Amino acid sequence: MSPTLSLFYFLSFLTVLSALMVVFARSPIHSVLYLILTFFCLSGHYILLNAQFLAAVNIIVYAGAIMVLFLFVIMFLNMKKEDEESKTNLTKVAAVIVAGTLGVILVGAFRKSQVGTYNPYAHDSQVGMVESLGHMLFREYLLPFELISILFLVAMTGAIMLGKREVGERHF
Amino acid sequence: MYPIVLLSVLGIVVLFLGFMKSKSVLLPATLLFLVLALASNFIDWNQGKVLYFYEMLAVNNLTLAFNAIVLVSAFMIVAMTRGFQDQEEAQPAEYYGIMLFSLVGAFMIIGYEHLIMLFVGIEILSVSMYILTGSDKSNLRSNEAALKYFLMGAFATGIMLFGIALLYGATGSFNLTDIQSYVSIQGRGVSYILYAGLLLLLIGMLFKVSAAPFHFWTPDVYDGAPTIFTTFMSTIVKTAGFAAIFRLLSHSFTPIYSFWWITLAAITVLTLLVGNIIAVYQNSFKRMLAYSSISHAGYLLIAVTSLSPQTENAILFYSLAYSIATISAFGVLMLVSKKKALEGQVDESYAAFNGLAAQNPLLAFVLAVSMLSLAGIPLTAGFWGKFFVFGSAVERGLVWMLVVAVLMSAVGIYYYFRAIIAAYLKEGDIGKIRIAPFYRIILVVATAMTILFGLAPGIFEKLL
């Protein structure tokens, strides 16, 4: 087993484990911390896949900014009370069946399909660098790149519109 | 392509017009911008298939016709807002700006050639809708609807993205034409990941058009949102969503029709049953229209499932007929419910229409025609819409599905006629409702179009 392969297995194990812990952890703060660990593991995968820029952005944006937001929200919500919303057994069974079916489909699809092979001679070590990414973004992907700014504009307008304070009372 | 660029810029212009002291310029400006976009839409008319921006966007007569339907519906809906003058808390500049931006998203998913355009377009459309749903900030039901729509929509987007990733894993491309050539070369021997990816992508898209197992958000969101934005959601999002689904399946996945038609047929039948049967039990007219929009998604899905040469015309005509009828029905509802409002609480039940015909013959007539069209009674556009849809199913030989659809349209007649009966036969104390001149014109034009297309559906086919 080559060092890269063993590193891949180690990272995958860690990713799956920390992702499971996000779901199973009792305290929401622990969940968030495990989520950060998951993001770091994913960044490791990006580096193994030769996408260095993506790895850095993933850490800065997700593990940094988004997680701070998560922590803020959890602090505001004040989830100290242990009143978990209880679901009926019927809901639980239905959820297990639905998720299990999807799991079976996905596992079956992955087991039966050929994974693409890798050609070491066509390897370009620069493919994940900012320069080649910029070339892609401003040439082939120019239109979606520009239109994403419309998406952000809509989101910002909406945030300001919904967040603005109003006089008057609520009604039903 | 031109309306996308134009509306992206003009949406920003509308936002800046909001800085002006007088808010009355916003409505005419927005209407003018929509007309400009409609005019620019037809620059590419009859050019054949044109690809723009490194094969990101495809333009042909079909996509232009869908764009035109979306723009005409948007024009009518914006004209009915009357500048939000009677609402103190309204922020018209933001509303109009977001509406124009959401149209950009609609054009993107109508003409996408690359899956990233589909994703960005659906996101622009959905995020705008989440915001507009929650725009009535002091109303708790509107807040709940927005949050519910946002959470469920975010999950649907996640599922869709996973599907796109799997499709890329199987085919090595995001481009619809490349995927099509991969599928047609491999035939039924395609990678199994492709099947999983296609299913997940379809689930994400069917969520947006509220097909049956993914419809649970629809009644609450349509009911909670301000009526004007409910109209926007139920016409524009549905038209664009079906254009997108049809484009994906007809362009890329025809060679594996035998794989996906069973799934889609099951969803179609479920959608028809759920939409029509639950609509019968509603007491609120607005909630009934929400379920009716689910059932119309079912009829449109029949056309997509049968995927015959007629399908594109059928979907086009059906979306047009459905959009016009829905706009006029909601238009009447907005006037009536405002008239019958009690302590800021609008009355949206069937009973609100009681005795409408006595003092307001025009409104009652508009309501009756739109209900007849939605029910699919002859001499209205809705009849021909159903006729074309059923015709494409016959061509594919899906007779059993037609039986279900015809039975369900019979169920539909019951709940659509309840509104007509309330308006014409029941006694009520509804007074004379004052209608603004422009509002009246829109209602009359929508009704006239419904009857015109009902008498002569051939006009429409000649246009294309």
Image: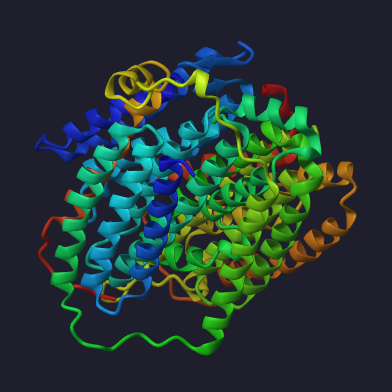
Residue B307 shows in the view = no
The colouring scheme, among rainbow, by chain, secondary structure or one colour, is rainbow
Left or right: B238 as drawn, with respect to A30: right
For the point 54% across and 62% down, the residue is B289
Instruction: Name which quarter of the figure residue B316 lies in.
Output: top right
Q: Residue A17, position in %: x, y?
A: 39, 64
Tell me: residue A21, above or below residue A94.
above
Quarter of the image for the C terminus of chain B: give it: top right
- Quick one: A34 or B444, which is closer to the camera? A34
Tell me: residue B452, above or below residue B260.
above
For the point 67% across and 62% down, the residue is B271
For the point 71% across and 57% down, the residue is B268
Q: Residue B45, position in %: x, y?
A: 58, 15
Left or right: B208 as drawn, with respect to B245: left
- Quick one: B161 or B117, which is closer to the camera? B161
For the point 46% across and 32% down, the residue is B117
